[in-house]
Image (spheres, rainbow, N blue to C red):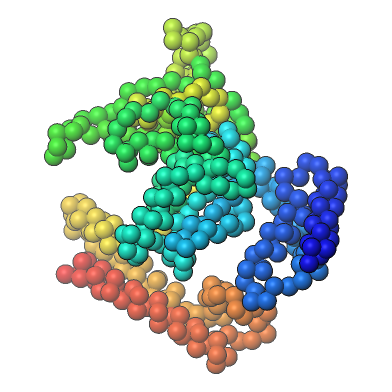
Amino acid sequence: MFNKFDEFLNLVTDKYENNLIDDPDAKVTKTVIALEHMLQLIDRLLDTPEPISAFQSYYDAPGYRMLAEVTSDLDKKGYMRVRKVVITPTRKIFVNPELIMGNRSLRQKGADEMLRIVFRDDNGMNLSGLPPFFIEKTVKETLSYCMDVGFRKFSYLCSSNSQLRDHGCYFLAGLPQDVQKFRERCGKFKIEIVSKMMSRIAQCFTQARECGILLERKEYSETFDFTGGCDSNGKVYTFSDGCGIISPDYCRKIVEDLKLGDCLPSCYQIRFRGYKGIVTVNKLFEIVKEWAERNGKINGLCEDGTFPWYQQSIIFRESQKKFHAPRSKHLEIVKISSPISVSMNKPMINILDQVSEMHGPEAHKRMCNRIYDLMEEHVDLAISSLYEETAASLTVNEFPKYIPYHRLKDFYLTEEPFLRSLLRASALVSLRKNLFFFNKIIFMFFR
């Protein structure tokens, strides 16, 4: 038995060393990819295969070689492989590293210094349905003490907002006092209620891509918010809450850095130092800058060491600053604006109904007719797959891929009995799902 283990270990070691010689810059070697997939497949099998032949077959498979290359490409785009541990009431499951978009803390410490922890029931579901005793035993004890993994100690660090919803958190290599020092280096946080303070710290763990272009201190500043009115508690409304502005010139640099091609998004969800929120493109930067250049009004730095506002790249709002963070020159992009498909819902239709009615009977009738036309188009789209081959082909390709539908070009999908039954079932489900919604529309507009 030990001879077999030594033989397997020597084979894996030799393959790994050869990978490092062949491609020393690779972030993930083909050997590691093969071992990870070997582990996944063995977990699903009832009988454990012979390890040497199994590893050799996975290693020689062309798909794993390609996967290693793809993983290296994703690493260049900001993705990181983080080790994951699933904690259940009865055991700890060490699974393969997870490929996720990096965050500020991961980039500072490195993926090898952190663990992603997820709490689950033994059946893979959330812990919410378990008695409080099991939840406390599973979660509280895990968070209260260090965890030993690979001859190293890991302690609870923080949870991002998405991880809190998914019953997960991050652990950092080191003792609790070491982890506390790292939290202090992330920024100066106000001592507030626990949930709010956790949300502030979680800002350092938001998955975001770091821009390669620098944002110098003189290129950004902070300005006031637009406020007015009060809510029922007497608190003033902040109409510009979390919404800063960005110059078109800096947007072009971001687009070039992210390799977005000809696309120039108008809105960016960002993280920068202690700031969070969105920034929208404002062409006033370019208009005023061009006017100043034509009239010789370009000045040097202001008293606070920054450029005049029209020469800056970003202007943040006061409401966007959540805590004081260390100096940084890199903007982090969480999301960019892009076109998406949307569906009208009852609240939106209700608003259109009321607003168009305020504009007079003619405008209201025009809106009613348009909504009714859209409703008819939706019904036609649902049933067109029963008599149009093109629509039928699009519909079956939306089904689960148990059948290679793309190879059925020689069949008449609307006439073949089995496929027609699938199309008919799909149309019925679509119509029944929207029947109640359609009745609401008819009652709303034709009352």
In the rendered image of this protein, does residue 163 appear above or below residue 194? below
Image quadrant where residue 109 sits: top right
Residue at the spot 27% in from the left edge and 33% down from the top edge: 238
Say whether residue 227 is visible: yes
Task: Please state the horizontal and vertical placement of residue 87, each as a whole percent of the image.
Answer: 48, 57
| 122 or 252: nearer the viewer | 122
| 326 or 314: nearer the viewer | 326
Q: Is residue 115 left or right of residue 377?
A: right
| 324 or 435: nearer the viewer | 324
Image quadrant where residue 342 sits: bottom left
In the rendered image of this protein, does residue 183 appear above or below residue 220? below
Q: Is residue 356 left or right of residue 299?
A: left
In the rendered image of this protein, does residue 148 appear above or below residue 194? below
Task: Please state the horizontal and vertical placement of residue 283, each as a whole percent of the image.
Answer: 46, 29
Residue at the spot 46% in from the left edge and 47% down from the top edge: 169
Task: Please state the horizontal and vertical placement of residue 382, each as a whole percent of the image.
Answer: 43, 76
- Counting labels gives 0
Q: Is residue 182 left or right of residue 199?
A: right
Question: Residue reaching furthest bottom?
Answer: 417
Quadrant in which the C terminus is drawn: bottom left
Q: Is residue 355 left or right of residue 52?
A: left
